[in-house]
Amino acid sequence: MAPNYETNSSMEKEWVLTYEGWTYRIPERMRPGLIRYRDKGVIPGDFLQAIICNNLVRAAGRADGENLGNLPAYANWLYNHLPLVAYGSEESMERWNEEGGSEGILKERKENAHLFEVPKPETP
């Protein structure tokens, strides 16, 4: 079954950060790129790449007005919805891409589970 990249109101809190009276929100149009990156390791466009690589200067230069005003929401989302190995540098982003995101990692673990099985002792 294909993953659902749409969002609904019950999942809205994942995309919103409220801090000291300010509300920051990742725009709906940006969410599918983040979800594909998290789940499949698909590298998104220039702005989201800059966010993922922790490059504030590049992110600010690539952002439109709506995204520029919501940068704290992106930092919050990365911190709370991606493992640390998936962001922070270009190398981390490329490695996450090569591994196929969280789905690729889970698939590899399932395929290699037999390597970690402890043999049952033979009964006499």
Image: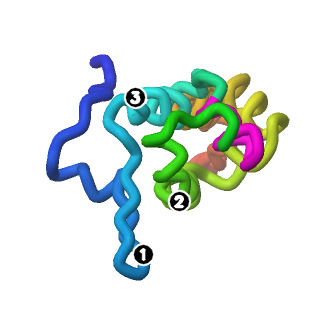
Residue 94 on the magenta span: no
From the image, give the main secondary structure of the stretch colored magenta.
helix
State how many labels appear: 3
Residue 119 in percent (x, y) is at 64, 45
Could you tell me which residue is drawn at 75 percent across and 38 percent down?
A: 58
Give amino acid for label 2.
Pro
Nearer to me, 104 or 34: 34
Amino acid type, mark 1: Tyr
Please say whether residue 50 is one of the residues in the magenta stretch.
yes
Q: Earlier in the sequence, mark 3 or mark 1?
A: 1
Q: Quadrant of residue 22?
A: bottom left
Circle 2 residue: 72
Distance, label 2 to label 1, CA atoms, is 9 Å
Q: Position of residue 80 (x, y in %)?
A: 50, 60
Is residue 54 toward the left or the right of residue 105 in the image?
Answer: right
Earlier in the chain: of badge 2 and badge 1, it is 1
Residues shaded magenta: 47-59
Q: Nearer the viewer, mark 2 or mark 3?
A: 2
Residue visible at 64% across and 32% down in the picture:
62
User: Which residue does the image show at 65% across and 25% down from the upper left?
Assistant: 46
Most extreme residue toward the right, as rendered?
A: 91
Identify residue for label 3: 32
Q: Which residue is mark 1?
A: 19
Per the image, label 3 sits on a secondary structure element best described as helix
